[in-house]
Each structure stands twice: as structure tokens, then as C-alpha cells.
Amino acid sequence: MANNSHIEWTESTWNPVTGCTKLSPGCKHCYAERMARRLQAMGQPNYANGFKLTMHDHALDMPLKWKKPQVIFVNSMSDLFHKSVTDEFIIKVFSVMNQAHWHQFQVLTKRPERLRRMDDRLNWTDNIWMGTSIETQQYLSRIDALRLTRAKIKFLSLEPLLGPLPNINLNGIDWVIVGGESGPGARPMDENWVLDIRDQCHAARVPFFFKQWGGVWKKRRGRILDNRTYDEMPRARV
């Protein structure tokens, strides 16, 4: 339910929830679904249900046992604000993050409308970074819902980036990640889309992180943009 991560912008993952359902075009080739099926076939007990959404009470206290401070991506294999995750379980996850103040937690959702509805019930300690995923212009409204929350650090994951995103309103946004789709059936990402987002971030003085070009063989394509890597991060507020 937890492990060191190969995701470039985090250090570890913690999955008190696994499984999800497809919501928008970015979900079409979901890496988490592929991985869950593989782990189910291998007999991994936490994936006995495959990619059916499952809450794991036994995994809730894991970050409290990790004494070394880490940056932790929460629910890399799910979406904490999925309609099938109970309010009570979400509040339990937040309670653990509140207690584990020595870690930085990164929570990412495609469902910021539910996040906004729950906002006043959540304890937004400084070590919780809250983000939303956007893949095309059609879903820019997710930023508005995120912006209305009381999260101390708000970020955008523009991955998989499936089209241009001109004129993003970055007011109140602390960090932007961009990445291309990877794995079987990966859809291409245009370099001009990425460069435009980078320039928007720099104009707004928002840290910009370029994760990957993606593709079927993502390691071959790497993550060099305009002759350099971009690993900018938000400033932690703890």
C-alpha cells in the first residue's frame, strides 16, 4: 500500500484507497488501472478487487510509522474524492496527514467539485498540497473549484496533456506539472503546448515542473524541454 515512487515529482506513494472509474479523456489509458490488474493477477491482496474502488482501513496509519520526512503522493492508484469514498474515510485520511506533520502530502483529484463541497470539513494543515488534473481546455473549470478551497498549496497536474491550454488563470496556483501520456496507445503531445504553458508559468511566477514527453517508450523520449530539465517546486510552508 506504500512504496518508493518512480514519479519524478514525489518521493513515496501511499494508497489508503485503490481503484477508480473513468471520468474524462485523460482517463482513457489509465496507468493505475493497468497496474491494478497486474497486481491482482500476481495475487497482491490489496488488489483482490482489481480496479474496483476499495477503501483500506489497515493502510491509514502507515505515514505515521515513517519517521524520515518524505514527500508523499496520496492515492496514486485512485482518487480520494471519488463518489464511492465516504466522507468519513476522507476525513480519516486528512487526520493522518494532519498528525504526520513532518511529511509533505500531495493529493490530486479530477473531482474538485466534491473537494470544494467538503472544504469546510477538512483540516488544511500546511503540509497538505492539493491539486487537480486537467487534460484539455474543456476541463479548465476544475481550477476554479480548487481555487475556492482553503488548501495552503494548490497545484495543477496537466497530464496527460491532450491539447493546448492558452490563457490559464494561474491566480492562487502555487505549482504546475506538465506531462505527456505514456504506455500503450499513448496520444502525442505537441511541444508548443508545453512551451506556452511554461511561459505562462514564468510570467505568473509559478513554479513549473516538466515530468515527461511520454509515449510508448517514455524513457527513450526523456524529459528535456528546450535543452534543459524543469524541476521547479513550490516552497513548503512548514
Image: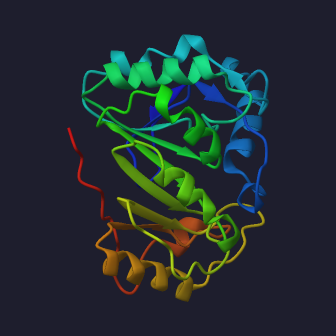
Q: Residue at position x 62%, y 22% from top?
A: 87
Q: Quadrant of residue 38?
A: top right
Query: In front: 220, or 28?
Result: 28
15 relative to 233, above or below:
above
User: In the image, residue 150 lies at what x, y percent?
Assistant: 40, 42
Q: Residue at position x 67%, y 44% from top?
A: 32
Q: Quadrant of residue 34?
A: top right
User: In the image, residue 47 lies at what x, y percent?
Assistant: 71, 25
User: In the image, residue 82 lies at what x, y percent?
Assistant: 69, 36
Can you name the residue that lies furthest to the left here?
238
120 relative to 33, above or below:
above
- Quick check: can you spot residue 39? yes
Which corner quadrant holds the C terminus? top left
Total marks shown come to: 0
- Quick check: can you spot residue 76? no
68 relative to 130, above or below:
above
